[in-house]
Image: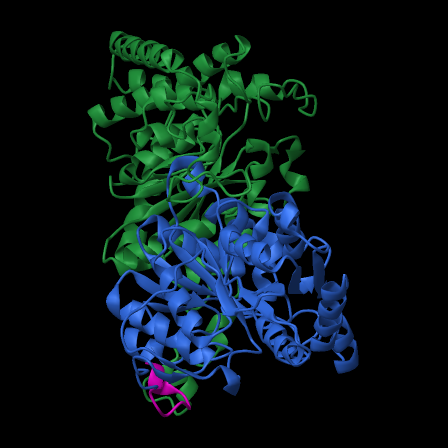
Amino acid sequence: MENLANKTAPRSAGDKNPRRRHRPRPAPFQMRVSTKFAPRRPTDGKPLGCTTETSLKPEQMLDLYRYLKLTRLVEERLVNLYRQTKVVGGVFRSLGQEATAVGSAYALAPQDFVTPLIRDLGAVLVKGIRPREIFAQYMAKAWGPSGGRDLNIHFGDIAKGFIGPISHLGDMIPVMTGVLLAARMQKKRTVAVAYIGDGGMSTGAFHEGLNFAAVQRLPLIVVAEYNHYAYSTPTNLQTSVRDLAEKAASYNIPAHIVDGNDVIACYEVTRWAADFARRGGGAVLIEAKTYRRKGHAEHDDQRYVPSGEIEWWEKNNDPLDRFERHLLEQKIATKNKLEEITADVLREIEEDCAWAESSPMPDPEQAAYGVFDNNIVPPALRPEFLKN
Amino acid sequence: MATATKKEHKSARPERGGQATLVEAIRQGIWEEMERDPAVFVIGEDVGLYGGAFKVTDGLIDQFGKERVIDTPISEAAIVGAACGAGLMGMRAVAEFQFIDFISAGFDLLTNYAAKCRYRWGANIPAVFRGPCGSGVRSGPFHSLNAESFFLNTAGLKIVEPSTAYDAKGLIKAAIRDPDPVLYFEHKKLYRLPRLREELPADDYIVEIGKARTAREGRDLSIITFGAMVLTALDAAAELEKEGLDVEVIDLRTLAPLDKAAILASVKKTNRAIVLHEASRTGGIGGEIAATIAEEAFEWLDAPVLRLASIDTPVPYSPPLEDYYLPQTKDVLEAARKLAAY
């Protein structure tokens, strides 16, 4: 690619033009998309595993396995609860794309922030949110973190570095610029990961937020999940670029394309991005290639998906299968060890689900409280006339 | 550094108190709060070196540096989003919209994020969203908005609009210290109006959010209003006094949550009410106030509650058109006379 920026006058202290002397100019543009951890087709006909280029220790890999399994099994339990009509709203699955959220969130330090979207339950769990909170939220219970006021992962826990999203896609990118500006003013070395999808990247807020982050050189890592569908809309109706990573060029920030179903690759790329951002390098865009195997929510019949597509991904490119294969082939864990972890996860889910089910529903009058700091019933709730 | 451009002087720190116009009062308030609390910062378009389109934030960057006085791209989503995110982290943004008309570009984040965070998961967002509002200055459809009724139907946002320099300073300080998001509307016609110049106390003070003010006491008729229309109401009241009509003027100051007690107390005293505002009539705050009076002070009324507001059109540019659009003193006089004779 021809580098047009190099043709402009170089910046120097002796420059006679006062504008050039005093105003910092951005670095010359260069297309920076790394494909080091991008998806590769297996050449030897063997089933896909994970990258072996990693600094992860064996126990960390087992930790990753635990979070992947936890994410999948929590969601499966949610589907059961949904079918028993215990879930009040919808259930949104991340089946087939769990590795992106888990791997990327695992690369962060405890003081770092994530803001997930609905299919990033894995990132929420990695940040230390317990399954019981998720179950209680979905069942609209009083003991849930929002006390029944909002659904699914629409809540947050600032102390754990988790800021929940709202339904409006793209909005969390500008919000995270504020979190990072605050961290800068407070002299903290915090980085943040904001998740977005191929659909959410079409919103104005996404671009406005990332532009601002890039201008301010904020340590914001945007993980863009290319999971092929936004509700029913395929990516070719969403954007005219082939790789979402290309959009980084607009902001002159580096980008990575990563195999989103390889949990180790997701970890490594985010780890690089977090180091880069923390050193003052500014924002980074990571595009994770993955696939959404379930519909938008449980009710969605996926009639818009070509036949055979889901099955292909399930058979050939499931993130858990791939990681399991990797752990066994690389002799990082035995089959027994993995089963032990799974049993442990199931036990936790049983316990937490029972806890959430035992929670009462919220007291109806609680609906009127908590709009402002003072616990007053909002004005004009009921006409005074009716009280006489 | 900031001194690199044509600007040659550094703006001096404003005095504490003393004679001040409305714009100077706001600036004093922000300045003092930034000195008092390192968590307070300013963010917006052209708020730094240029000092804001109306110079409300003039000089702050020299005193507090560009880390606390942040010039943004032209992006209301970035401004509101950043104020929200920083608020979650315990910072207190004073975010500027260059004109309140542009608040529409930040509407989503204001109404869906800032307003709902505390209710949804207990995370309060202490931020002030401020900017010049108001018509009557020949600025046309996109620089004349009164935006309050867009937000009255959103729980979680407080809305204030001062009409005196004293209130402007007291309310901006109260808004900055408030733990929840506050929309702070500044009528641009009042910014430098000599009539509003007044002596401010040198001591720290706030004006409590949620409390109306009696701008003029009277016995015969209440005009409930706010912002620049307070002056219109006071002018009309002075005229009506000559005719033997004793008019009370209530300056709401806070539009959400409304000071119902003050409204009802005044109407119960005078038994007649005009609600006067600049925004268009249909769906305006006047309807809410009139309905409140009808519901809760029906037995005290001697006449119907009248709404005087602008016509239901965009704000036109040309002076004759805009004057027709806006309620004028003569409209208030006519309405008051009719109501008194009812």
Query: Residue at coordinates 38% horizontally, 39% vertically from top-left?
Result: A375
Q: Where is residue B216 in the image (x, y as percent from the top left)?
A: 53, 71
Question: Would you identify the image quadrant in which residue A181 lies?
Answer: bottom left
Is A381 rendered above or below residue A92? below
Query: Residue at coordinates 40% horizontally, 77% vertically from top-left?
Result: B25
The reply to whether the magenta stretch includes residue A265 is no
- Identify the image's colour scheme: rainbow, by chain, secondary structure or one colour: by chain
Res B244 visible: yes
Query: Residue at coordinates 33% horizontally, 14% vertically from top-left?
Result: A352
Residue sitting at the far front: B244
Q: Identify the main secondary structure in magenta.
A: loop
Q: Where is residue B321 in the image (x, y as percent from the top left)?
A: 79, 76
- What colour is chain B? blue
Res A262 visible: no
Location of the C terminus of chain A by quadrant is top right
Q: Which of A378 and B43 is in front in this view?
A: A378
In the image, taking residue A314 as reference, residue A373 lies left or right, namely: left
Q: Which of A103 and A220 is in front in this view?
A: A220
Q: Position of residue A239 (x, y in %)?
A: 63, 46
Q: Position of residue B53 (x, y in %)?
A: 51, 78
In the image, taking residue B180 as reference, residue A235 lies left or right, namely: right
Q: How many labels does the image show?
A: 0
- Looking at the rendering, the stretch of residues picked out in magenta corresponds to B1-10
- What colour is chain A? green
Is B194 rendered above or below residue A133? below
Q: Which of A90 and A18 is in front in this view?
A: A90
